[in-house]
Amino acid sequence: MPHLIVYAAEDDLAGREADLIGGLTDAVVAVYGDWARDITEVLLIGLPAGRWGVGGRVATGPAPRVVFGIRDSVFARPDAADVLGRLVAGVTAAVVGVVGERVRSGLAVEFAGTREGRTGVGGVLSAG
């Protein structure tokens, strides 16, 4: 199942949670299809001011970071660059649409591929 973890300044998330969760889910559905809507998970992690650093200094107004959990097999598909590019563009547009244009240039999307048999749900190792 697609899952996204968004790390952002708490001030950027407060009061915008529903819009961001909806927008990110829509971005995934735009690439995968409507079947993915009910299984897409979004976790928002808000960091208070002073708890984010860049270059050894406390960051002011850091851009969000999105870690996108995805099946490792996607990377081997012949259309992988297209799929991943569309996901990056959609996720970026969703975050910028809610948080604002000021975060676009620094917003990072990282794909974390998981191989089959390396996750478990409900106490059972997942086969895929």
Image (cartoon, helix red, strand yellow):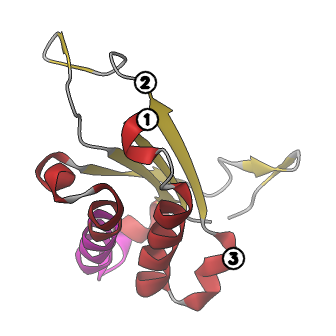
Q: As shown in the figure, which amino acid type bears the numbered disc 1?
A: Glu
Contact (Cβ within 8 Å) of mark 3 with mark 2: no
Which type of secondary structure does the marked residue at label 3 adopt? helix
Pointer 2: what residue?
A: 48
74 is higher (above) or lower (below) than 111? below
Asked whether 125 or 32 is in front, the reply is 32
- Report the magenta residues as a range: 76-92
17 is higher (above) or lower (below) than 73? above
Contact (Cβ within 8 Å) of mark 2 with mark 1: yes
Q: Is residue 61 visible?
A: yes
Q: Which residue ends up furthest to the right in the rendered image? A: 123
Which type of secondary structure does the marked residue at label 1 adopt? helix
Pointer 3: what residue?
A: 38
Quadrant for the C terminus, please: bottom right
The picture places residue 102, in percent across and down from the top left corner, at: 15, 51
Query: Which numbered circle lies on residue 10?
Result: 1
62 is higher (above) or lower (below) than 12? above
Marks 2 and 1, how far apart at CA:
5 Å
Q: Which residue ends up furthest to the top in the rendered image? A: 56
Instruction: Decide which of tag 2 and tag 1 comes sooner along the chain.
Output: 1
Q: Is residue 68 left or right of residue 55?
A: right
Q: As shown in the figure, which amino acid type bears the numbered disc 2?
A: Pro
Q: As shown in the figure, which amino acid type bears the numbered disc 3?
A: Asp
